[in-house]
Image: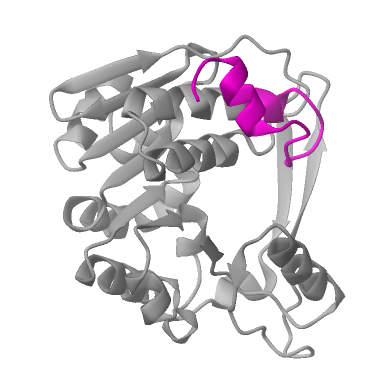
Amino acid sequence: MAYVGKVTDDQLGRIFAHDLRAQGAVYLTAMAPNGNGAETGRCIVLVTPDGERTLNTYLGSSEHLEAADIDEAMMADAEWIFLEGYRFDGPESHAAFARAIAATKGAGGKVAITLSDPFCIDRHRDAFARMLREDVDLLFANRAEMTSMYGTDDFDQALSRAAAEVEIVVGTDSENGATVVCGADRWQVPAIPTEVADATGAGDLFAGAFLWGLTNGYELETCARMANVAASEIISHIGARPEADLRALFRDHGLL
């Protein structure tokens, strides 16, 4: 597993790089030089008693990821790449995405993306629409993102429209669970009832677990069940890193 993202060669950037590599991830993106006017990005998250959160984000040097930061050989070696829609903001971001996609698809790999936020869709609607039609093999989006992308208040209609363009579509809907659509096949996977302490990271853990299942050969419905287990774990406590062994939880739910 490898990660591509821009940080500055400052204290926070060095901690980020160290912690990421300590988790076993390959991280080779060149750091922005310290003192260039942008520090390493960060986010302050305020969590209310009902588990909902407000994010105050400073993008910092992450906004300046560019095509030159994309290692084409690494992309070509990937079975899947996962693109973060938030990272579409930035002066050179579209070119970076294009280079990563071209290298991956050119070598037979596949592309997954999360739309991230309705406001992000509003800023880049045409570019997202073109990417979904031409390049994306797996789409992750929640109800608000999916309906925003396809200009309808009807979640099912938005899912169907997405499935006409993308091979695998995964729509999440909070306590209503997730819907997976692949061609004529459709699965409705219930959420795991959980007392929400902090919703931060639910979408990220959902997508990560789904992709883990997919790249390890599990059926799409099982991937979605794994994803719901991971999301349930992360929202049950404060903080966006799992506190339990996710594989053990998958086994507990009969998924391994």
For the rendered model, the colour scheme is: one colour
Question: Could you say where residue 148 lies in the image, as x and y percent from the top left?
Answer: 36, 36
Asked if residue 154 can be seen in this view, the reply is: no
Furthest residue in direction right, as rendered: 11
Q: Could you say where residue 72 lies in the image, as x and y percent from the top left? A: 37, 80
State the residue at coordinates (69%, 30%): 234
**Quarter of the image holding residue 9?**
bottom right
What range of the chain is rendered magenta?
A: 231-256
Quarter holding residue 45: top right
Q: Which picture quadrant has residue 49?
A: top right
Q: Is residue 87 left or right of residue 233?
A: left
**18 shown above or below 47:** below
Looking at this view, is 154 or 62 the one in front? Answer: 62
Q: Is residue 108 left or right of residue 81?
A: left
Taking depth in this image into account, of 116 and 104 the one nearest to the observer is: 104
Task: Residue at 44% x, 72% y: name it.
Answer: 93
Residue 15: x and y in percent read 82, 69
Magenta segment includes 170 = no
Residue 112 located left or right of residue 59: left
| Residue 226 drawn above or below residue 125 | above
| Residue 97 as seen in the image, left or right of residue 232 | left
What residue do we see at 52% from left, 60% from top? Answer: 1
Q: Position of residue 201 (x, y in %)?
A: 65, 39
